Image: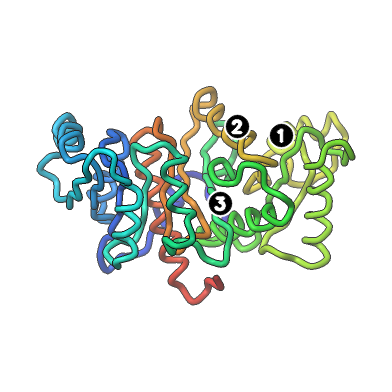
């Protein structure tokens, strides 16, 4: 199975016995709130809003959402909003954690703190899905949020997380590209050396349920014509790849923001590898991205609870 568009991920949302309780940390972000209530309207979540009550109510009133059902957890100025949200998760009163109007660093520090219990034996990394105008299906990208300069072992975990996320959406053996500046191994470019090692190891002793290719340049991933002109022999160039694994966070972050601004892409994303799904989008994300990220989390939550998931 391949996801041609975001209708495909909506079809993967299971029939829920009850909506997932989403704990929104930093609840005065307007597009986050609109996305959460859009997901509630479709029966996917019920919102628990953690943040400044007055600012949150002002935003709700601006969009006519003040009479929608929600739970408010008011936090005083200077209080650690993310910690409060995590405490709600740990008390058993939340199913999904969501970053709201909080800087990424302030959100991730308590999330990654071992004593808060969200970590598992898996590395946490962010996986996004993007719908690009000239690409024939959704394209995954990782990691644009958590791991700044992953080493080769951390890259294995990032690959595993992406493969598992795609398996949650019905992929049996996703095809992943290890992005680099060039497609040839160049010894003064460490990421090309690591890409070759990862591909070799995956063939000899697989560490993830996927097919892996790299190093490979961006134009070759997306264009059959580029592959033809460069005499690059790969059957998945120009529409066959299901995901791109970036060499570092900056590359992935710039790439996805370029897609959003210049290609008018639609994206969504979540942190994978935690005890609960974590919806994490840019604070500049629109309502649709926020809503789709919660759909992503609902699919991940169902996958984690299924007998097919070997975590």
Q: Which mark is residue 218?
A: 1
The one of 267 and 78 positioned closer to us in this rendering = 78
Q: Nearer the viewer, residue 79 or 190?
A: 79
Outermost residue toward the bottom in this view: 307
* For marks 3 and 2 on the same chain, the one whose residue lies earlier in the sequence: 3
Left or right: 22 as drawn, with respect to 232: left
- Dot 1: what SS? helix
Query: CA separation, marks 1 and 3?
Result: 21 Å
- Residue 187 location (% of width, % of height): 89, 40
Q: Earlier in the sequence, mark 2 or mark 1?
A: 1
Q: Which residue is mark 3?
A: 125
Say left or right for 54 vs 15: left
Q: Residue at x 72, y 40 (%)?
A: 179
Determine whether label 2 and label 1 are within 8 Å by CB: yes
Residue at the image position 40 percent from the left and 30 percent from the top: 284
Tell me how many marks there are: 3
Is residue 34 at all visible to an observer of this figure? no
Image quarter in which the C terminus is found: bottom right
Which of the marked residues, 1 or 3, is nearer the chain's N terminus?
3
Q: Residue furthest top?
A: 262
């Amino acid at each position: 199975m391949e996801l041609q568009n975001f209708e495909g991920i909506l079809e993967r949302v299971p029939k829920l016995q009850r909506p997932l309780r989403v704990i929104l940390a930093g609840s005065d972000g307007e597009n986050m709130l609109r996305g959460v209530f859009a997901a509630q309207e479709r029966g996917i979540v019920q919102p628990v809003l953690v943040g400044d009550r007055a600012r949150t109510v002002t935003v709700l009133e601006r969009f006519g959402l003040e009479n929608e059902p929600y739970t408010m957890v008011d936090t005083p100025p200077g209080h650690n909003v993310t910690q409060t949200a995590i405490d709600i998760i740990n008390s058993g009163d939340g199913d999904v954690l969501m970053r709201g109007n909080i800087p990424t660093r302030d959100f991730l520090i308590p999330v990654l703190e071992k004593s808060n219990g969200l970590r598992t034996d898996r590395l946490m990394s962010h996986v996004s899905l993007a719908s690009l105008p000239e690409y024939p299906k959704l394209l995954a990208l990782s990691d644009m949020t958590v791991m700044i300069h992953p080493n080769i072992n951390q890259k294995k975990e990032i690959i595993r997380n992406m493969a598992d996320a795609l398996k949650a959406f019905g992929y049996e053996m996703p095809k992943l590209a290890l992005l680099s500046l060039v497609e040839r191994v160049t010894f003064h470019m460490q990421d090309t050396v690591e890409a070759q090692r990862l591909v070799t190891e995956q063939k000899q002793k697989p560490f993830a349920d996927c097919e892996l290719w790299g190093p490979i340049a961006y134009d070759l991933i997306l264009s059959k014509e580029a592959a033809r002109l460069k005499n690059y022999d790969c059957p998945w160039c120009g529409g066959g790849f299901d995901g791109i694994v970036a060499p570092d966070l900056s590359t992935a972050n710039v790439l996805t923001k370029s897609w959003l601004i210049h290609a008018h892409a639609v994206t969504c994303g979540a942190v994978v590898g935690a005890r609960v799904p974590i919806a994490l989008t840019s604070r500049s994300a629109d309502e649709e991205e926020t809503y789709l990220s919660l759909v992503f989390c609902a699919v991940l939550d169902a996958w984690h609870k299924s007998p097919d998931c070997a975590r």
